[in-house]
Amino acid sequence: MTADANWLDKGNREVLDKMRGEGIDTVWDRLARQEPQCGFGKLGLCCKLCNQGPCRIDPTGHGPQKGVCGADADTIAARNFIRHIAAGSAAHTDHARAVVETLLDVCRGKAGDYEIKEPDKVYMLADVYGLETEGRPIKEIAGELAEETLAEFGRTEGTTTLIARAPKKRREIWKKNNVEPRGIDREITACMSRTHIGVEHDYRELIRQGTRTALADGWGGSMLGTEIQDILFGRPVPVRAEINLGVISSTKVNVVVHGHEPTLSEMIVIAARSPDMLDAAKAAGAEGIQVSGCCCTANELLMRHGVPSAGTFLQQELIIGTGAVEAMVVDIQCIMPAVADTVRHYHTKLISTSRDAHFPGAVHVEFDEHRALEIAKEIVQMAIDNFERRDPSKVYIPDEKTELIAGFSHETMLYMLGGRFRASYRPLNDNIMNGRIRGVAGVVGCNNAKVDGESFHTILVKELIKNDILCVQTGCSAGTCARVGLLKPEMKEFAGPGLREICETVGMPPVLHSGSCVDNSRILIACTGMVNEGGLGEDISDLPVVGLCPEWMSEKAISIGHYFVTSGVYTIFSGGGTLLVQGAGKLSDYLFDGMEKEYGAKWGFEEDPHKVARMVREHIESKREALGINKAAERKLFDMEDRRQLVV
Ligand code: SF4
Ligand code: MSK
C-alpha cells in the first residue's frame, strides 16, 4: 500500500504539492512513515486489555495461540470489535444527548436563539412515546418529549423506545436473539465491562452484546440525533450547493466549520449573515463572509441551508493549506489533531468549541447553547479580525468546485417518490417490483488515507447506478461522490435505463444525499417504510437492499455497519485492507456467514470495489428472486398520471 493521494483532483493535488513545498506534513506523509503497519493489529489479533500483555496470536499457527490469560484469537478479536462498536455508539449517542438537552433548554426558555422548526415531527415522536398532545402548546409537548428522550440514555427498565418503529418481524428477530437494546448508556457500559479481562470469553456472546449496543445506536442515539436535529434546525429538503476547495473565497473572510454537531454551526451561519458582522467584514477589507464546512458538520449545513462544503475527511488539512482560511471552527469527531500543527504555518486560527474536544495550540471558545448567537458572533468576529493577517504569498485556491443536490431526508424521499400530495413509498416499491430499479444501496462511510487511486466510493456508485441500483448516501461517502459530480441530476445519463427513467420522471439524481453519519438512521426508517408499504416482504432482510461502507475509517462506521447487519441489511465494508477481525477464524465465519441464520443478514468484506459491485448485484438479484419479483410481467413506470391519481 503506498501512501499517496492519487484520488485527488488537480486542484487538491496542487494544494498538497504546495504544502509539501512549504515543509508541511499531511496525512499521506504520516501514513508513509507508519508503514509497514502492525500485521497483528490488522487481523484483530493484538490484545492490550491488561498489563500482562500486550499479547499477540500468531496467525500462521506456529507461534502462540493464546494470550497470557488464555484468551484465544476469537475472544481477543471479538472483544476488540465490540469495543469499537461501544466507542462508535458512544460518539453518536453523546452527540444526540447534546441535541436533546438543547431541545429541553429551548422548551424551558433557556436557549432563546433556537426554536422548534418542525412541529409535525414533535407530534410524530410524541405519538411514538405515547404522549398526550390534545390541546397542549407545542413547547409543552416538545419539553415532555425532550425529558422522555433524555431518559432513554439512562433507561433502567424496558427497551429503547424507538425500536418500536422497526418492522414487526424485525422486532421479533431481536427478541428471539435476546438483543433488544435497553438503556443506551447501559449497553455501552456493558460492552466495556464484559470486555474487561476475565469476564466474557464466548465470542458469540460478546457479539450479542455488541449487537445490543449497535442497535441502541442506530435505533436510539443516532435516530434521536437525526430527529431532534430536524425538530430544531428543520427537515432537509432538496437544495443546490457546491463542494470542493474552490468554495473557499479569495475575497471574503473564510470560516470553515468542521466536525459533526450542527448546534453551533447553525448559529455561525446566522451570525455570518447578520448585517453587523457583514459590516465588520467590509470594514476589515473583505467583500463578505464565506462559511463553508468540512466532514459531517458540512453535511448538516449543506442539507438544511445549501452552505457549501469545502471538503471531506481527507481534505481537512488541504482546506487550511489554501492559506485563505481565517478560522477553522471545530466541534467533535473526525477532526485530526494534525490541524493544530497545520495552522501554525498559516494565519488560520483553529478554534475548538466543545467541552469534549481540545487541541493543544488551538484557541478554545467553549460553546454554550444558552448564549449561542453571542458566542457564534464572537467566533465570526475573531475570523474577521484575522483577515488582515492573511498572507497573499501563501494563498492558492484551486478553481475546482462541483454542484450537487442534497437534502434527501427520509421524508423528502417519500414526497419525491410518492408525489406532492400523498407521501408514500408505493411508487418506489412498484418500480423495484417492475424492475426499473433493481434495488437500493446505502453507500456510507469515510475516507481512508490507505486507499490509493480512484476512490472506492466513486467506483462503486458509478457501477451501481449503471446497473439500475438507486444509491442513498451519507457522510464523507456522499461528499466524495459529490466532488466528482455524481450527485447532480445530470448524472442520470450515467444510470441504467430504468433508473434513468425514474430520475427523469421524478426529477431527482440517481444518487441521493441523505445527510451526515447520524443520519444513517434515515436509511433504517426508509427501509422500514418500504417494508410497511407492502409487496417487498415482511422484513428489512427481505428487501433488495445492501449497505456499503467503502474506505471505512472510524469506529462509528463499525457501529453503523453492525446495526445495519442486525437490522437485516447485508453490509459490505472495504478499503484499508481489513475489518480487524480476519485473523480470528470462528469469529470471521460467524460475522461473514453464521449471522445470516439469526438476523437474515451478514457482514461482508472485499477490498476490490469492482468485486463489491458484483457482490451487490448478486445479492440484490437473489433477494428479487426470493420475492418472486423477477417474474413480474409488466415493467411499468410510475408516471405523472399515476402520481396524480394518488391525490387524496
Ligand atoms: Fe493478554 Fe489476556 Fe491481558 Fe489481553 S487480557 S493482554 S490476552 S493477558
Ligand atoms: S465525518 S465518521 S470520516 S463519514 Fe461523519 Fe466522514 Fe466517517 Fe467522519
Image (cartoon, rainbow, N blue to C red):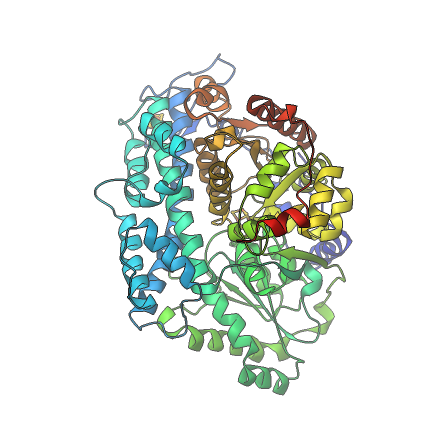
Instruction: Say which residue appears at 33% left-offset and 19% top-offset.
Output: 70
User: Which quadrant of the structure image shows residue 620?
Assistant: top right
Instruction: Say which residue appears at 35% left-offset and 29% top-offset.
Output: 172
Q: Horizontally, is 207 left or right of 1 in the view? A: left
User: Which quadrant of the structure image shows residue 209?
Assistant: top left
Choose between 549 and 328: the one closer to the eye. 549
Instruction: Say which residue appears at 30% left-offset and 50% top-offset.
Output: 129
Vertical side of 418 occupied by 202: above or below? above
Instruction: Say which residue appears at 44% left-offset and 20% top-offset.
Output: 597
Quadrant where the N terminus is found in the figure: top right
- Work out whether residue 486 can be spotted: no
- Work out whether residue 482 can be spotted: yes
Choose between 382 and 260: the one closer to the eye. 260
Residue 360 location in percent, x, y?
46, 60
Residue 267 location in percent, x, y?
48, 71
Residue 24 location in percent, x, y?
65, 56
